[in-house]
Image (tube, helix red, strand yellow):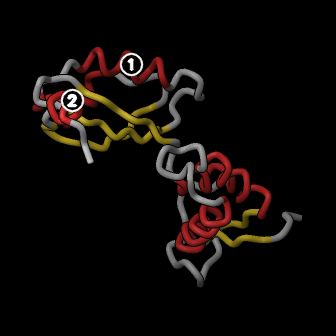
Amino acid sequence: MSTLKEILTRRPVLTTIRVTAPAGAATPQPLSKGLGQYRMNMMAFCKDFNAQTQKFKPDIPMAVTLTVFKDNTYEFTVKSPSVSWYLKKATGVDSGSSRPKHVVASELSVRHLYEIAKVKQSDPYCQYMPLESICKSIIGTANSMGIKIVKDLD
């Protein structure tokens, strides 16, 4: 149950937006198409985002959940890249199979799968999930992309 102070200090939310921006290299120009209508300070957001993602390699696509409030302020959370992006990078393919479960696009070792799961566990939404559950989710994504999971790569 919320206290009276929490209720009085809540800011009304205007919208919540999900965008993908390159790590450490966000600029107002491509983001303004989706975010400009909410009259938020795009330059301040880009500076904040770039400062928070400077530890990642440039041009890694980072998923951002941006909450814009009615007083034109904002909050955002940054997630690591999508599982499909990691799978493509780990296997070296540009895209998955056009016929998953019939045509194998590539193979991935269990060790690589585990490393991707450890990275995804640092996401705000996955930090309390067991590593086994994250691995199962990644296996499902790999299967839908036509990537075969093997014990060891030869």
Can residue 33 be seen in the rendering of this structure? no
Q: Regarding mark 2 in the picture, which secondary structure is present there?
A: helix
Residue 38 drawn above or below residue 85: above
Residue 5 circle label: 2
Measured as percent of width and height from the top left, residue 137 is found at: 57, 67
Tell me what residue is drawn at x 34 percent, y 40 percent.
65
Q: Is residue 115 visible?
A: yes
Badge nearest the viewer, 1 or 2: 2
Residue 22: numbered disc: none
- Return the residue nearer the eye: 88 or 149: 149
State the residue at coordinates (47%, 17%).
51
C-alpha separation, residue under disc 1 versus residue under disc 2? 28 Å
Q: Report x, y in % for residue 36.
A: 15, 28
Foreground of the two, 102 or 136:
136
Of the pair 136 and 143, the residue shown nearer to us: 136
Q: Is residue 95 left or right of residue 117?
A: left
List x then y, in percent, for residue 115: 72, 51
Measuring 27% from the left and 48% from the top, which residue is drawn there? 1
Q: Amino acid at mark 1?
A: Asp
* Residue 130 in which image quadrant: bottom right
Q: Earlier in the sequence, mark 1 or mark 2?
A: 2
Looking at the image, which residue sits at the far right?
154
Q: Picture quarter containing residue 133?
A: bottom right
| Residue identified by numbered label 1 | 48
User: Are the residues flagged by discs 1 and 2 in contact, CB closer than 8 Å?
Assistant: no
Label 2 is placed on what type of residue?
A: Lys
Which residue is at 52% across, 36% downward? 60
On the rendered structure, is 28 left or right of 35?
A: right
Would you say 48 lies left or right of 58 here? left
Could you say whether the residue bearing mark 1 is in a helix, strand or loop? helix
Point out the image quarter for the C terminus.
bottom right
Quarter of the view holding residue 7:
top left
